[in-house]
Structures are given as C-alpha cells and as structure tokens.
Image: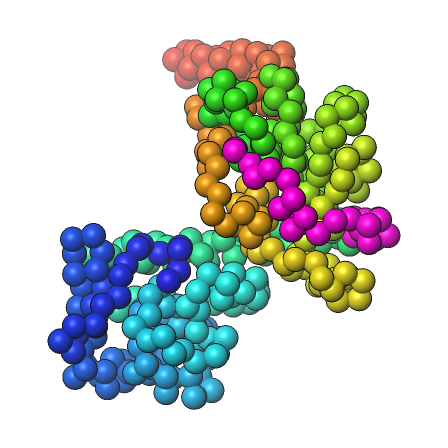
C-alpha cells in the first residue's frame, strides 16, 4: 500500500477484485477481464509517444506479470495489490520505499503520460491529484539540486573530516522518546503552553530560537539546510546550546558552521546524495539510511521517528504546510524577525505614497486632457 494515495482495502470475492474505500466498493478486475485489462495496459504503453514514459496507476494483479517480461518503457504505480507475489522490477512501485526510489531517480528529462483506469470511479480525481503531487515533489527536488549542487560540494568537503566521529542516528534510541515534534509554522505561537509540559522535544532548527525564547529547551535539534541562512537560527545561542547539552541531527551536506557549534553530540545518517553515498561506503558503511526526497526538515524528523521509535506517536506542532494571513513562521524565529523588519521599513511607506500620487496624478492629467 502507498501512503501517498487514498486508503483502500483490496478484496477478492466471487472472482471479483475489488477496492473498498469507506462505504464504497469499486469493482476493479474480474477473472474474465484479466486478458482485456492486460491488453489495455499494453496498448497504452505502446501508444506512448517517443521520449515519454507511460505512468499507469492501478492495483497490481498477477495478471499483469507479463508486462514486466517485456523491455517496454513504463512505470506501474500500484497503490494497492491483489497479489502478495510481485515481480522484483524497478518499474513496479508498490510500497513507500519503491516510491521514494522512483522520486529520487527522476531526472530533468523525464516526461510522463499518466493513465488512470476508469475503474477508479469516484476516486479518479483523487488518484490523479496524488500522482501529480508525487511528480511535483520530484520537480521540487530537482530544482533544489540545481540550486544547491555547488554549495553541497563545498559543505561536504568541510564536513567530511569531522563526520567520522558523528554518531549514527539510531543512537537516539538510547534517549527518551519525544513527546513532541516541533516545526516553525505560525501555529506554534498558540502551542507554547502545551510544550512546557513535554519531557522530550525534537525540533527543527527554524523553531529553536522561538522555543528558547519561551524557556523551552529541546533535547534534539534537526538542521539540514545547506544555505548560510541556517546559521541565523542559532545566533546568540552558543551558551544556551552548551549549558543545556543540546544535541544535533545533521546532514553531511548541511551548513558547516552549524555543525561547529558546541552541541553535546552530533548524529548523522546516510543520505541519498552520491557524495554522501561514496563517503558512507568508504568510511561509515554502518550508517543508517533515511529517506527524505522532499529535503524538508519536518519530513526528516518524521522519517527518523518511524525508524527509531516506530510505535511512538508524539504530538506535532507548527507543521502548517503554508502561511496564515501571509505569516509563514512563528514569532521568535529568525524568518519572522526578518519578515517583520522588511514589512516595517520606511521604504514601504514611501512606495505607498509614490504610487498614490502617481495614481491620482495620472487621473488628474487624464481629466485635464
């Protein structure tokens, strides 16, 4: 089952292969329709224009095994499966690990023709939207790579010599499991009172100064941003980090200055970048791999939690996924302070009056003319 798609339950009854979604039952295949469905998918693959890849989104059934015996260029995304035995083929994406690999392997030149079989019925639009979001996530990843590639190389050369002494991220299992995961969205402002009662807090670096401002001291801080702006989150907090024995989870491509702050201990994982993979293979083959295709620190925290404490379900704060009235970050964060300074600059007032005078000046000229 793929978590990116609507939740469905595969059932086989009376020679019918069905998907149950809530109270709705979708008949997807039957024993008699197998050859027809296989033929339909084969035709769609054959009709795909050169340079494009046919992207089929449908439940997998053993009926479709012959597709994977052919050299055809296609991807079969299976949100659910009617067969336990599945081909060991990179073209079949039937679990979240395979989906992450698909997203990570995508290149700028890839073009996809999405085919959503009509059997999806009332879920057709939701399945199509989920597929487009996966492709959009891959596009964001590629854009990030183009933007940061040079900086990643510089950061890696500076971080690698120290990284041989970093602890594996699984060593976090020796500490108390987190009660809360904290990001820096504006909803964090209203969650401060609840966080004061938490025994163990993991937070994103962006949320760190906001929490310290309320005398909440996270045990673990996650920081993976390669850019110089990530240093802003720790400005003036060196003594706080030292006095509270704060620990850091970082990426080998992250900002080197952050990793030189006086953290009690630094934890690292095996990322997917080729530089990191080569380092791991040569120097740290036992490092635990973590998937984070979106490059988002919040998703990394969730991925680490699932790996280290699979049964723990902490409360999540500040994970808004957008803005509130054009406010993107909580008060007390470096980004909030920067946005506030920009919004209150006198130049904005000057610009407003300039536009006002230009508008009415133009109107008067038109009237006089």
- Residue extending furthest toward the left: 14
Given residues 77 and 21, the one toward you in this image is 21
Task: Give the left or right position of residue 286, taking residue 79 as reference.
Answer: right
Q: Position of residue 164 (x, y in %)?
A: 82, 54
The answer to whether one can see residue 113 in this image is: no
Q: Residue at x 63, y 29 (%)?
A: 218
Residue 179 part of the magenta segment:
yes
345 shown above or below 20? above
41 shown above or below 28? below
Given residues 79 and 240, the one toward you in this image is 240
332 shown above or below 289? above
Magenta part of the protein: which range? Answer: 154-180
- Residue extending furthest toward the right: 161
The answer to whether one can see residue 167 in this image is: yes
Q: Position of residue 33 (x, y in %)?
A: 19, 81
Given residues 304 and 187, the one toward you in this image is 304
Q: Quadrant of residue 293?
A: bottom right
Given residues 259 and 311, the one toward you in this image is 311
Residue 227 part of the magenta segment:
no
Task: Give the left or right position of residue 23, taking residue 357 as reference.
Answer: left
Q: Quadrant of residue 231?
A: top right
Q: Residue at x 80, y 66 (%)?
A: 282
Q: Residue at x 62, y 50 (%)?
A: 144
Q: Position of residue 92 (x, y in %)?
A: 43, 73
């Amino acid at each position: 089952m793929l978590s990116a798609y609507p939740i469905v339950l595969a059932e086989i009854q009376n020679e019918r292969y069905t998907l149950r979604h809530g109270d709705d039952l979708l008949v997807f295949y039957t024993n008699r329709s197998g050859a027809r469905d296989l033929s339909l998918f084969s035709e769609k693959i054959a009709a795909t224009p050169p340079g494009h890849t046919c992207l089929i989104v449908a439940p997998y059934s053993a009926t479709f095994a012959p597709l994977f015996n052919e050299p055809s260029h296609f991807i079969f995304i299976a949100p659910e499966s009617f067969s336990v035995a599945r081909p060991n083929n990179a073209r079949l994406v039937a679990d979240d690990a395979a989906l992450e690999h698909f997203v990570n392997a995508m290149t700028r030149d890839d073009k996809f023709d999405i085919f959503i079989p009509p059997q999806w019925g009332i879920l057709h639009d939701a399945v199509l939207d989920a597929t487009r979001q996966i492709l959009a996530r891959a596009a964001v990843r590629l854009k990030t790579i183009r933007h940061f590639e040079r900086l990643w190389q510089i950061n890696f050369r500076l971080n690698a010599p120290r990284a041989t002494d970093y602890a594996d991220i699984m060593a976090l299992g020796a500490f108390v499991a987190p009660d809360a995961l904290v990001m820096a969205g504006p909803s964090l402002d209203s969650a401060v009172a609840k966080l004061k009662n938490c025994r163990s807090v993991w937070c994103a670096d962006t949320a760190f100064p906001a929490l310290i401002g309320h005398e909440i001291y996270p045990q673990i801080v996650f920081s993976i941003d390669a850019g110089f702006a990530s240093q802003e989150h720790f400005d003036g907090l060196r003594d706080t980090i030292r006095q509270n024995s704060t620990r850091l989870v970082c990426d080998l491509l992250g900002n080197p200055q952050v990793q030189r702050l006086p953290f009690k201990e630094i934890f690292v994982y095996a990322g997917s970048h080729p530089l990191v993979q080569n380092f791991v293979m040569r120097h740290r083959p036992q490092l635990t791999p973590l998937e984070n295709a979106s490059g988002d620190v919040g998703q990394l925290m969730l991925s680490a939690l699932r790996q280290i404490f699979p049964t723990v379900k902490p409360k999540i704060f500040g994970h808004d996924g957008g803005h509130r009235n054009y406010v993107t970050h909580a008060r007390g964060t470096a980004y909030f302070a920067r946005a506030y300074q920009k919004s209150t600059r006198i130049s904005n007032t000057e610009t407003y009056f300039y536009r006002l005078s230009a508008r009415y000046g133009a109107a008067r000229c038109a009237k006089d003319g």
